[in-house]
Image (tube, rainbow, N blue to C red):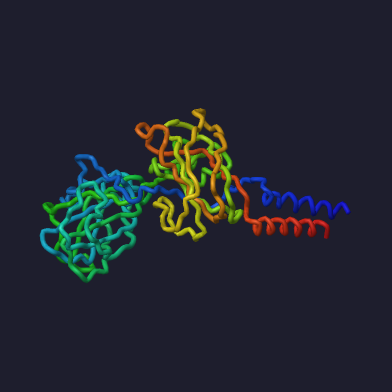
Amino acid sequence: MKRVLSVVAVLAAMTAPVFGASIPILAPGDFIIGVDADGMVSNSSYPGGEAPPNALDRDSGTKYLNFGGPGSGFIVTPSDISLVSSFVLTTANDAEGRDPATWELYGTDDAISSVDNSTGLAENWTLIDSGTVALPSDRFAVGPVVPVDNMAPYSSYRMVFPELKGASLMQVADVGFYPLPDGSGPDQLSPSDPILAIHAGWDSRSPAAGPTGLSEGPASAIDGTTDWKYLNFGEVNSGFIVTPSIGPSTLDSFEITTANDAVERDPVIWMLFGTNDPITSANNSDGAEENWTLISGGTMALPDERNTLGPRYVIANQSEAYTSYKMLFESVKDAGAANSMQIGEVQFYGIPEPATVCLLGLGALTLLRRRRA
């Protein structure tokens, strides 16, 4: 009789959420990515002495540096319509991590209306080719010839470097475009050609590590410790998409723990969305590839004390269970003073779907039977 009662007690505990007892929904290891609803933006800028024309001056002692980092590059308009079948990059003076690691080359015959330090997306661009480039560790060194699969000449070209060797700034000393795949023929670029700095990236960036060396990516928001935090330089309209491993659930409330510093970065206005679509949005994207349903929203008054659990906020009007959730923070405590949004921890509370709870109960029953065997 005792054994039967033990099983019944376990099953009752596992199925309690069905009868209204709200439980934590998020757990360390759940799928989570950082997003920002503002979409594609430019963070391009450069020092006055390290401007884009330096990439065309055929002098490895000068360089073009872009503070936008990954996703930065340039638009160049050769003096004549040209066919580009290969290119060569020359490394700059310092910081190997700033070297491009991947590239995308686009062409257009539109008149260039993009401005300097923009996204460079004002024109109709055709992706010509893309790939990797293995630049040498040596400084002031000419890199390998990179073939480009291109059969059409264009009046202007847009080169983007989506990934770098590891740094947060991008730099090149010189760039050469050539008409043949082996890098032969005259350089299609000249020092007098118009060239613009660009950066095309999602307005969502989380540092790999903070000043303490600890992670500040989205996973730190559900790791169960306030030692780490989630920080997003997208600031307003940034947030996260999370897929709880517990399965489909109906939420009724949430809590947020403040991070370690900078009160002005604390979120104030929140919006919660749900979806049952598979998540195809990428980390540090706008998180808009899925069909999202607005569930609820409101304001928060998180405590100014750091690493402190805030109040529990009600999620109103959710009547359908969802497999994934997107939470966006439309404002922070002081957008003028803040350079980012941050939270220490987040927890959703709600009720898993009955099917999920039944599976958990069956798992518990199986475990008890194995222990009796």
User: Is 37 left or right of 182, judged from the image as shown?
Assistant: right
Viewport quadrant of the N terminus: bottom right
Whether residue 313 is visible here, answered yes or no, is: yes
In this view, the residue in front, 20 or 302, is 20
What is the x, y in percent for residue 133? 32, 59
Q: Residue at 21% of width from left, 59% of height from top? A: 157
Q: Residue at 58% of width from left, 51% of height from top? A: 250
Extreme residue in the right direction: 1
Whether residue 61 is visible here, answered yes or no, is: no
Residue 340 versus residue 126 in the image, above or below: above
What is the x, y in percent for residue 119? 27, 51
Extreme residue in the top direction: 305
In this view, the residue in front, 197 or 247, is 247
What is the x, y in percent for residue 242? 51, 51
Q: Quadrant of residue 245?
A: bottom right
Q: Residue at 74% of width from left, 55% of height from top? A: 364
Q: Quadrant of residue 369?
A: bottom right
What is the x, y in percent for residue 259? 50, 35
User: Is 79 left or right of 242, judged from the image as shown?
Assistant: left
Viewport quadrant of the C terminus: bottom right
